[in-house]
Image (cartoon, rainbow, N blue to C red):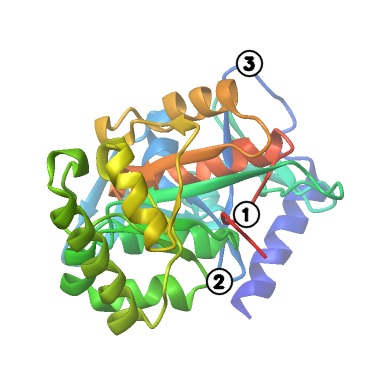
Amino acid sequence: MRRNLICFFLLILLFSGVGAARTDSVMEKTLLPLSDELYLPLRPVTEFFGLPLHWNAIEKKAYIGNRGIEGELFAGTFYVPVVELAIAINGDLNWFPERGAGFLHYQNLSIDLQLPRPPEKENPPLVHLTFDDGPNEGTPYILDVLDAYNIKGTFFLVGENILKNPGVAKRIVAQGHQVGNHSFTHSLMPNLSSRAMRHELELTQNAFRVIMGVDPVLFRPPYGGWSPELRDIYHEMGLQLAWWTIDTQDFNKPGARVMVDQILREIEPGAVILFHCKLSTANALPDIINAVWEKGYDFRILLEK
């Protein structure tokens, strides 16, 4: 019933032509499809429109002025249904289902809305999303985003973190993502003895087998630390080195816009994009995914059969 009312409201707005006047003050936002509804992140929208926003922790509800609005906490960001947001702010919502696009208009400002659009052409060029240092507190948020967009990534996991967060580690594999060895203690490998380097890799492989029931074939050294001695060890263990071609430096929290611009500058077929399992990265991922899709690329795991 709720979904039918939302569709009816969208149709009324579509055929009424409300909000037809546009201005040059426009922000672009991609809608997030959750639970058969279309959501927008609340904070950037209210900031763009200049609306007061506060959070009531007891009610677990956001307020725009004195108007309460409910939503979903997704990847550390509060998202609300776009229809309910339009009602709460008395804005004009125009939506065109055949295009998967529309706009939300408030006073003299507009937000261009669009659904996420994977490339429609056959055999698009592929890039790879990789995430280091998990499983940790940021990993579930990364997994939420990838699940919402039906994208698989490759996670290079630290052995001691697997032991600390076995549930999250199992979830990575259960959702169909690829995993790789990222050492046991995240040490700079060339600073270790040969015996210690081998021990780091063996302990991590064992953690994968015992906790997750998998035997990874990929290895990424922490900090990119490499040496001929290390190469001999991971080759003897049957591991393949997995480097990257685009380093987002997301540990510095550059923000979604900076990362999107960098990725689009450096992207090419087969690019391997380096991220870390951080909440700030999860927040930026929707914008990054949509920008890469719009560029005509799609995503795959490394070494996909």
- Residue shown at the point (39%, 50%) measured from the top left: 131
Residue 239: x and y, percent? 43, 59
- Residue shown at the point (26%, 37%) measured from the top left: 223
The answer to whether residue 26 is visible is no
Specify the quadrant that holds the C terminus. Answer: bottom right
Specify the quadrant that holds the N terminus. Answer: bottom right
Secondary structure at badge 2 equals: loop
Q: In which quarter of the image is residue 268?
A: top right
Residue type beneath disc 1: Arg
Disc 3 and disc 2: Cα gap in Å?
33 Å
Query: Viewer-nearest of labels 1 and 2?
Result: 1
Instruction: Identify the residue under disc 1.
Output: 300
Query: Is the residue marked by circle 2 packed among few (<14), some (14-19), or many (20+) residues within 10 Å?
Result: few
Disc 3 and disc 1: Cα gap in Å?
37 Å
Residue type beneath disc 2: Ser
Asked if 260 appears above or below 8 in the picture, the reply is: above
- Residue shown at the point (62%, 54%) measured from the top left: 300
Instruction: Identify the residue under disc 2.
Output: 35
Asked if 33 appears above or below 31 in the picture, the reply is: below
N-term-proximal mark, 1 vs 2: 2
Instruction: Identify the residue under disc 3.
Output: 24
Q: Which of 205 and 66 is in front in this view?
A: 205
